[in-house]
Amino acid sequence: MAYLPFPRMLQLETTPRCNATCVICPNDQIQGREEMSMEMIEKVIHDCEGRGLNELHPFFTNEPLMDTRLFQVFDLAQEYLPETGVHLYSNMSLMTERNAYKMLEYSNFKFIAFSLDGATKDVFEKMRPGLAWDKVRSNCDRFLELRSELGRKDVHVKAVLTLTPENEADSQPFINMWADRVDEIMVMGCDGRNALGDYAAGEREGKAGWYAQDPRWPCRQHRCHQHSMYVLSNSNVVLCCKDIMGHTIVGNLERESVEEVWTGDTMNRLRLKLDNGIYDEEACRRCPLMGP
Ligand code: SF4
Ligand code: SF4
């Protein structure tokens, strides 16, 4: 099969840092990765110039606003990738009025997901330790007001609840809360990524097993390996958005360009495997979506 000559979406972990320790997330297990240098970020953006990249996601398993250089990344994207939409997933705790206003001034800012995981203070703060419900709610509300005031309805807003047994009771209230206020509501099963350690030990029980049969597989349904590239802050390119710890390295952008990695032998070999349903790479053997 012929693959795209260049990715349509590039996910770039400029920093691995987050200010929360969410129940669903292994962010606090990430070790040995530091912020990507600004020079490296610029290099990656220049690699994508004029190549028709549809989406740039300047985050991975972290909070994008934890990177104090986020607006420099927006500046670079606006200047060198004017045809590319910048997309964010945010926990909204740091989306102050000033940050929201500034972000909404970038014409290529096109998408934001409010990652919330609860519809009540009690559930939210259990699901998202480190974050305060009242603050996050008011930041979301002010963001939506500013979006209207600034005429930026082209910025698609999605409210996300990642489902676990701890917050199932909040799912309908969550839908009611955001109906008619945002463009999209997503209530999705947790992929079990918070229990990667259990999977590494060969255990298929506990939290990671709850949604092990979830049908939203990046490789089986969205076919992400055919159109999306994932770059860790150490410049390693990984196979898949589920490979948070970097177990299967496709290439490294310090030594290669985005195009070289994307069209290289390693990526083509791995893509072919996934297209043929072969999941024997280290990332896949540790995949949080793999069922028992
Ligand atoms: S889910 Fe998002 S906000 Fe929560 S710890 Fe992970 S990266 Fe941070
Ligand atoms: S099986 Fe492999 S490619 Fe598929 S979602 Fe899991 S880690 Fe990604």
Image (spheres, rainbow, N blue to C red):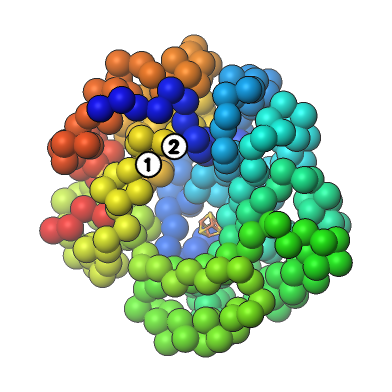
Query: Where is residue 99 drawn, in percent x and y?
Result: 80, 54
In the drawing, does residue 125 fall left or right of residue 67? left
Mark 1, ligand 2, within 8 Å: the answer is: yes
- Classify 10 Å Cα crowding around label 2: few (below 14), some (14-19), many (20 and above): many
Whether residue 270 can be seen here: no
**Quadrant in the rendering for residue 139:** bottom right
Is mark 1 in CB contact (under 8 Å) with mark 2? yes
Which amino acid type is shown beneath numbered disc 2? Ser
Q: Indicate the secondary structure of the residue bearing disc 1.
A: helix
In the drawing, does residue 213 fall left or right of residue 130? left
Query: Where is residue 116 drawn, in percent x and y?
Result: 56, 70
Determine the residue positioned at 69% across, 57% down. 155
- Classify 10 Å Cα crowding around label 1: few (below 14), some (14-19), many (20 and above): many
Residue projecting furthest to the front = 2
The residue tagged 1 is 224
- 81 or 241, nearer to the observer: 81
**Quadrant in the rendering for residue 274:** top left
Q: Residue 83, relative to residue 147: is it above or below? A: above
Residue projecting furthest to the top = 255
Query: Where is residue 135 drawn, in percent x and y?
Result: 73, 73
Q: Indicate the secondary structure of the residue bearing disc 2.
A: strand
Which disc number belongs to residue 159?
none
The residue tagged 2 is 228
**Quadrant in the rendering for residue 58:** top right
Determine the residue positioned at 57% across, 40% down. 55
How far apart marks 1 and 2 lie (CA) works out to: 5 Å
Number of disc labels: 2
